Amino acid sequence: MSSARIIIEPGSRLPSATRIAAIPGPFGMQRGGALPAIEVAYETWGTLAPGKDNAVLLFTGLSPSAHAAASPQDPTPGWWEYMLGPGKPLDTRTYYVICVNSLGSCFGTTGPASPDPRTGKPYRLGFPELSVEDIARAGHATVQNLGITRLHTVMGASLGGMSALAYALLHPEAVENLVSLSAATRATAYAIALRSLQREIIRHDPRWNSGNYEHGKEPVEGMRLARKLGLATYRSAKEWEQRFAHKRLPAELVDKKTVFDMEFEVESYLEANTRKFINSFDANCYLYLSRAMDLFDVAEHGGTTEAGLSRLRLRRALVIGVETDILFPFDQQKQLAEGLKQVVPEVTLAGLPSIHGHDAFLVDKERFGPAVGQFLSAR
Amino acid sequence: MSSARIIIEPGSRLPSATRIAAIPGPFGMQRGGALPAIEVAYETWGTLAPGKDNAVLLFTGLSPSAHAAASPQDPTPGWWEYMLGPGKPLDTRTYYVICVNSLGSCFGTTGPASPDPRTGKPYRLGFPELSVEDIARAGHATVQNLGITRLHTVMGASLGGMSALAYALLHPEAVENLVSLSAATRATAYAIALRSLQREIIRHDPRWNSGNYEHGKEPVEGMRLARKLGLATYRSAKEWEQRFAHKRLPAELVDKKTVFDMEFEVESYLEANTRKFINSFDANCYLYLSRAMDLFDVAEHGGTTEAGLSRLRLRRALVIGVETDILFPFDQQKQLAEGLKQVVPEVTLAGLPSIHGHDAFLVDKERFGPAVGQFLSAR
């Protein structure tokens, strides 16, 4: 029985392809506390086979919505347009694909910006501590809501890869294959440091106001600076050197009121890229999701990483990483693949020589497309 | 004739080993404007030979003072204690070493925090745009003040390496050898981006107040956050992973008022390391010196990097870099060494497998010491 329904929140119009799974509560959280109930925004592509054996669940990175690709209901391009669709690597003529907006996010799924039904006001910092496992369990409840008991594949990149791995750990019998892109069994100290600093920058914005900012008075300056730092961790020095090197902006674009105003192309790129983001993402949601990435650790599922991974009942796994990724370095992909090999019959590790760093999965379709397509076509 | 003298500024006691070279003005600046006069704080070690042919000029990175090492006048440890002293790689039994506090800094040399003699008030943003070439020329004036016409060696790390290179470009007949540590002919786009963001963070602190902060009301929060980002560019992911991995702080040190408060060792390390810095360095000076690093480009000395380097009249050069450096990556060291080889009879390139990143020259004495010592002992 599916209780999926379309909900239009007051003041926030969801794209028409987005559906909402209403999950009855209480929804207990991994690190304590519970939500009275949750809603999960999701989109689907393709057709569920009569045997319900062709479902692929896709978790997203920190910032995307469930709109991974265009569909008849919403023809606007999604965030993974090249990967997902008829005849594409994740072929929706074969697979029934479900993409969920993560628990804790702000694109239709319950998160810190959602109204607490007990008060009618946003949760804000009253939202319980968020874990990757909570995101995985919200995804699992959504899949169950759709009447699917076992996934063909769970997959995701970055935070989405951690969520996919958590799904396979928490519901080992409910998934056959795993695709992990640019993710890991836990964060590195360096990744924690750089995310921790982003969160401090946001919290240092006076408008953050301990999470109690009002509509129209969001901490956009803190978000802008944090996003720039985020971008520096998502891309690579090599890519920026090729694109920008030491190039100056054209004189007519330089407005040097002080000696510190921007005059290099790379500074202008950061500024433009940041503006797109800060008006669409809620600051508290960003803080919660960012911290969840720091906290995730497969070793918590058994005492050691190996013991945690031994819970898995997968048949096949694909681990993809990128040599220029500083957030989830390729060494972590190798470690994940080595660990999986102890318990999963068939494990493929792909190290891609992309210059695009952590975000390569979003842009480097020539490398990521074939790697995923090959895995999924070998049923 | 030397006009060096000891000056004690009102309210700021200089260590007793620090001397001041008073350089008469106007001191014209590379990118326009002039300072009415400048003072350069410096320290010396060893004895100038009768032929004045054993002088080594040392430029510093962005933040140190001229106190590179202990001396009878100031026995407190300096910032490069392992490198400099009797029997050390830069052997003060052989060499007469001069270390200058950079123009634009705040440890005795004229900079944005110094009083403008025309008004009696600090320059603040009235300080003209600062270039690495200005730092080099202030160093050269100091050397001239000491009656030295030709240096045995000019050397420096990071910004100091850029300053040393600028010195050799601007005063080709006045220097015989160059030692460049973890520096380059120009900044990468990535380094510009990360420094630009540090400057934005400081300028976004309301207490910065367009540079017009008062004593006791400095923008310490902005400096704290910028310094944390700086640290992430000075060290390496590999080092932090070895030291901190996913380790939590002991429970008694965790004060979780919100879900975002620090609980990982790496977060605590960043906090502790930052506190040391923010009370000693002036924010405006930091902004000027940081921007000078972005702007430096050897190509401005001839149209191309090659043409710029062709001005050099060096006999020998040593270029040292570190494989884990993300701020001045080893590729840049190779390019610098290749460029130098076109015009310098003897060039040595040393790539050190240190895990300490850009700051390795400060801490990795086992690798940097011998590399420098070998070059300087082969007179």
Image (tube, coloured by chain):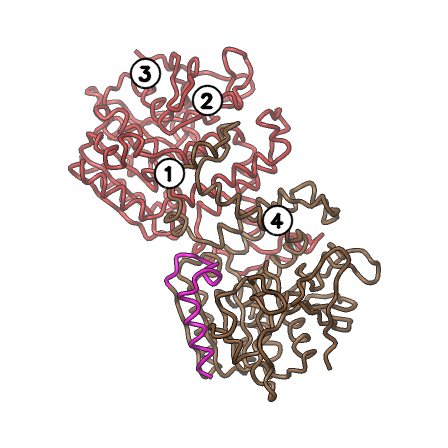
Chain colours: A red, B brown
Numbered label attached to residue A128: 2
User: Which residue does the numbered mark 1 point to in the structure image?
Assistant: A158
Q: Image point 34% across, 40% down: which residue?
A: A183
Q: Amino acid at mark 3?
A: Asn
* Dot 4 and dot 1 residues touching (CB under 8 Å): no
Q: Quadrant of the C terminus of chain A?
A: top left
Element type where label 2 sits in the image:
loop
**Residue at position x 67%, y 82% from top?**
B147
State which tag comes first along the sequence, 3 or 2.
2
Q: Which residues are magenta?
A: B353-379
| Coordinates of residue A108 in the picture (x, y in percent) | 46, 22
Which image quadrant for residue B192? bottom right
- The image position of residue A325, as x and y in percent, is 38, 48
User: CA gap, disc 2 to disc 1?
Assistant: 22 Å
- Mark 3 crowd level (few <14, some 14–19, many ≥20, 10 Å Cα): some
Q: Name the mark nearer the viewer: 3 or 4.
A: 4
Secondary structure under the numbered disc 4 in the rendered image: helix
Mark 2 against mark 4, which lies toward the viewer? 4
Q: CA distance from mark 3 to mark 2?
A: 24 Å
Would you place residue B258 above or below residue B198 in this image?
Answer: above
Residue lying farthest bottom?
B51
Please state if B318 lies on the left or on the right of B299 as rendered: left
Lower sequence index among marks 1 and 3: 3
Residue under label 4 = B278
Nearer to the camera, B199 or B378 = B378
